[in-house]
Image: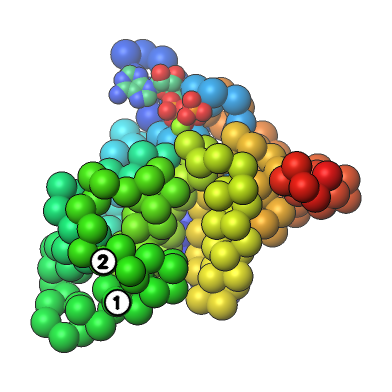
Amino acid sequence: MTPKLQAKNLRLAISGREILNIENFMLKNGEVIALIGPNGCGKSSLLKALALIDPPAAGVIYFNGHPVYPGGDMPGARRRMALVFQEALLFDTSVYRNIMIALRIRGVTGKTASERARKWLDRFGILHLARRSARKLSGGEAQRANLARAFALEPEVLFLDEPFSALDYPTRKTLLNEMGKLLKDMNMTTLFVTHDYTEIPYLASNVNVMFEGKIKKSGTVQTIFGEEIFEKRMLTPWEA
Ligand SMILES: Nc1ncnc2c1ncn2[C@@H]1O[C@H](COP(=O)(O)OP(=O)(O)OP(=O)(O)O)[C@@H](O)[C@H]1O
Ligand SMILES: [Mg+2]
């Protein structure tokens, strides 16, 4: 089956230092890959290259089997992807308008847009916050709004760069459980960067391990971590 997203021979160097050197990266339709590795190994750089935000110096990126970089429909492919970072990066307006603006940028307006916005606010349990200023949300609420906005775009590929890192333990766990179900229900193709390995089993079935700009290992969650990882799922104090 044609991979949803593939990259071959990606190279990126900044000031003569190699940041990325990826021979072959593949994300299959509906697959959720966790991308891990030490600080500075290139995880965010790879994510931004694949999301066509920071295209690499060399290499080819394929979307649905078609080369989109270099020389393809890069804006078209980018519109079918969504990104969520650690910081919620919301516009300074209401939660509802945050989603409406993002949809308008992608050409979705009117009733379709408002229905979609409400649907995803509801799915993330924050419909009651629709009129609230995004600046007046708690960290957890802001990240819910951010995720609702990403899903409202109905992307074909979702990129998550440590989206739960700033949240407290119980909030993180609740959101991870919800996200795990959602990614499965939607069959969402996802690349999930995290530095907290206990988050992995909630979302991902496969893992890529990066080191110094290269993917050193890839495999299922079990082959990379062993079965113990499933016992190390986050426990809140009242469960421990
Ligand atoms: N615009 C830039 N200019 C110079 N160096 C950069 C730039 N962007 C990234 N780098 C360097 O590239 C390397 C990889 O950075 P990247 O942010 O991809 O790492 P990361 O794996 O996401 O790290 P972290 O776990 O800390 O988020 C780092 O050494 C970083 O300093
Ligand atoms: Mg990073």
Proximity of marks 2 and 1: CB atoms separated by less than 8 Å = yes
Q: Residue furthest top?
A: 16
Q: Nearer the viewer, residue 238 or 13?
A: 238
Instruction: Using the rendered view, name the quadrant where residue 53 is placed.
Output: top left
Residue 216: x and y, percent? Answer: 66, 34
Residue 28: x and y, percent? Answer: 56, 65
Looking at the image, is 192 positioned above or below residue 104? Answer: above
Q: Which mark is residue 98?
A: none
Q: Secondary structure at mark 2?
A: loop
Q: Can you see residue 178?
A: yes
Looking at the image, is 100 positioned above or below residue 162? Answer: below
Left or right relative to 180: residue 65: left
Quadrant holding the C terminus: top right
Look at 55% across and 40% down and name the residue there: 168
Ligand 2 image-quadrant field: top left
Q: Nearer the viewer, residue 12 or 178?
A: 178
Left or right relative to 100: residue 166: right
Q: Nearer the viewer, residue 112 or 4?
A: 112
Looking at the image, is 221 positioned above or below residue 185? Answer: above
Q: Amino acid at mark 1?
A: Arg
Q: How does the figure colour the protein chain or chains?
A: rainbow
Looking at the image, is 83 positioned above or below residue 49? Answer: below
Q: Amino acid at mark 2?
A: Ala
Q: Mark 2: give few (<14), some (14-19) or many (20+) Cα within 10 Å.
A: some
* Residue annotated with mark 2: 130
Look at 18% across and 58% down and name the residue there: 94
Q: Which mark is residue 118?
A: 1
Q: Nearer the viewer, residue 129 or 51?
A: 129
Q: Residue furthest bottom?
A: 111
Residue 148: x and y, percent? Answer: 37, 64
Q: How many marks?
A: 2
Look at 32% across and 13% down and name the residue there: 15
